[in-house]
């Protein structure tokens, strides 16, 4: 409605100077000035800007009209001014549509402590068990268990690629490969202690596993089910991110507070970024150039965390977003405008606006300890594993899609 007001008023000004005054040069000047003012006041933010915009249009008319005194304004000028004033009252009640914030839609009660979560296109949720060697396949609508995968203990990252489930199991230090169509399950060593993250190379059919306990990355041949190579890293690699061209691997080393970049084809480190933030726990690709570094802690004195945004073109940190301390994991919205992150120690799921660079909403689940989080393929829902309350919380993101 606000944009319609702008177009309507602009069309009146255009008609006045083009058809009545027959002065196209003057028209260009006025339209340019109106456009600049319209951009500066950013009318989408406040209804008062509509008043300001229309008042400015009124002033422009008075300045450029040959009659300097309102009493001497001819009929056409008077009629145009009257229309503008009326439009102010017509659109004064128009307000920017308020966003519908995310809300909890349902909770699935479980008999086990949930670990990582993955979501299929077919309406199934895969939930790892923290203290069992199992991954439960649960119906998204009813919450009933449909199947159980015999995995390793504590699946902390689950990927689904081409109807095959891959999971790294932190406590048992192994990797699970489950074929959804045939039901075949294979468990193989991860090549290190306490694997924490997993990446998939579809072209070369390789898996990259970050072993936080042994400070290395293992490269596993999917077809042969063998470890192809091991790459040493800085201490405690918590998360990894494979670039789109499958050539480079970013590694977040949690307690050494560094980000490393590896050439995986040559198995060598290209650089180590020192000022990544305090305890970088996760890397999230925002777009072609930017990566969000999720830091668990930043300032111990005020218990806050940062989300640092890293530019892969010049390897510099561009800005940071300060949020509640103790972030565990995050996921990017489908529109790539928001980050949804969990803060277990504060029982919160928080929503971060990447453009505004701040938290804009939060959901508190008291005594639940929300940790792992994932998003549905259509982007409309997020799924959060709450460990203390032993449940999966389903949240509809609404306008924060």
Image (cartoon, grey):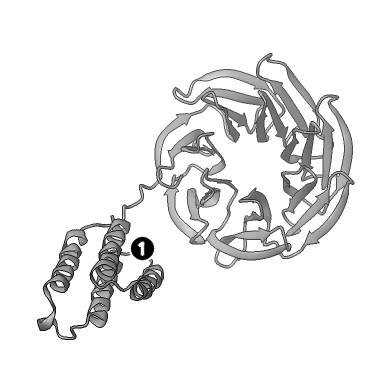
Where 193 falls versus 87 (above or below)?
above
Query: In the rendered view of the protein, which quadrant contains the N terminus?
Result: bottom left
**Where is residue 317 drawn, in percent x and y?**
67, 64
The residue located at (30%, 66%) in the rendering is: 14
Q: How many marks?
A: 1
Q: To which quarter of the image does residue 298 belong?
A: bottom right
Left or right: where does residue 131 sit relative to residue 378?
right
Q: Which residue appears farthest toward the top when viewing the image?
A: 182
**Where is residue 66 drawn, in percent x and y?**
21, 83
Residues 53 and 300: in front is 53
Residues 107 and 14: in front is 14
Where 123 falls versus 322 (above or below)?
above
**Where is residue 120 drawn, in percent x and y?**
57, 27
Q: Which residue appears farthest toward the bottom when viewing the image?
A: 68
Residues 191 and 381: in front is 381
Q: Which residue appears farthest toward the front when viewing the image?
A: 22
Left or right: where does residue 157 sit relative to residue 343?
right
Q: Secondary structure at mark 1?
A: loop
Where 262 falls versus 36 (above or below)?
above
The residue located at (75%, 44%) in the rendering is: 245
Q: To which quarter of the image does residue 34 belong?
A: bottom left
The residue located at (84%, 45%) in the rendering is: 264
Left or right: where does residue 249 sit relative to residue 267?
left
Where 186 falls versus 57 (above or below)?
above
In the rendered image, which residue does mark 1 sit on?
A: 45
**Circle 1 residues within 10 Å: few <14, some 14–19, many ≥20:** few
**Where is residue 84 drawn, in percent x and y?**
19, 67
């Amino acid at each position: 409605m606000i944009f319609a007001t702008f177009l309507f008023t602009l069309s009146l000004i255009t008609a006045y100077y083009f058809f009545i005054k027959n002065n196209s040069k003057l028209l260009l000047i006025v339209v340019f000035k109106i456009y600049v003012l319209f951009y500066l006041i950013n009318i989408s933010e406040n209804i008062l800007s509509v008043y300001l915009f229309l008042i400015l249009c009124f002033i422009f008319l008075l300045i450029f009209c040959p009659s300097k005194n309102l009493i001497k304004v001819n009929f056409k000028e008077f009629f145009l001014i009257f229309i503008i004033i009326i439009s102010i009252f017509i659109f004064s009640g128009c307000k920017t549509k308020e966003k519908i914030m995310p809300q909890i839609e349902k909770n699935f009660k479980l008999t086990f402590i949930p670990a990582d979560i993955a979501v299929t296109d077919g309406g199934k949720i895969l939930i790892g068990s923290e203290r069992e060697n199992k991954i439960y396949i649960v119906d998204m609508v009813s919450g009933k268990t449909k199947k159980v995968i015999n995995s390793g203990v504590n699946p902390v990252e689950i990927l689904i690629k081409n109807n095959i489930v891959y999971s790294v199991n932190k406590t048992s230090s192994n990797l699970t490969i489950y074929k959804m169509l045939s039901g075949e399950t294979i468990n193989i060593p991860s090549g290190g202690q306490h694997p924490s993250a997993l990446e998939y190379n579809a072209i070369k059919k390789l898996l990259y596993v970050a072993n936080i306990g042994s400070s290395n990355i293992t490269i596993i041949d999917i077809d042969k089910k063998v470890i192809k190579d091991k790459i040493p890293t800085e201490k405690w690699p918590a998360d990894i991110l494979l670039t789109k061209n499958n050539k480079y691997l970013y590694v977040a080393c949690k307690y050494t507070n560094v980000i490393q970049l590896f050439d995986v084809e040559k198995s060598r480190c290209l650089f180590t970024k020192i000022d990544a933030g305090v305890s970088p726990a996760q890397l999230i690709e925002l777009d072609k150039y930017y990566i969000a570094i999720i830091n668990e802690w930043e300032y111990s004195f005020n218990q806050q965390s940062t989300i640092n945004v890293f530019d892969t073109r010049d390897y510099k940190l561009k800005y940071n977003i300060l949020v509640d301390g103790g972030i565990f994991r995050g996921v990017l919205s489908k529109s790539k405008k928001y980050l949804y992150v969990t803060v277990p120690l504060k029982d919160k799921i928080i929503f971060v606006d990447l453009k505004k660079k701040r938290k804009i909403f939060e959901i508190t689940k008291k005594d639940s300890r929300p940790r792992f989080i994932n998003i549905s393929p259509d982007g409309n829902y997020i799924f959060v594993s709450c460990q203390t309350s032993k449940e999966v919380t389903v949240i509809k993101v609404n306008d924060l899609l």
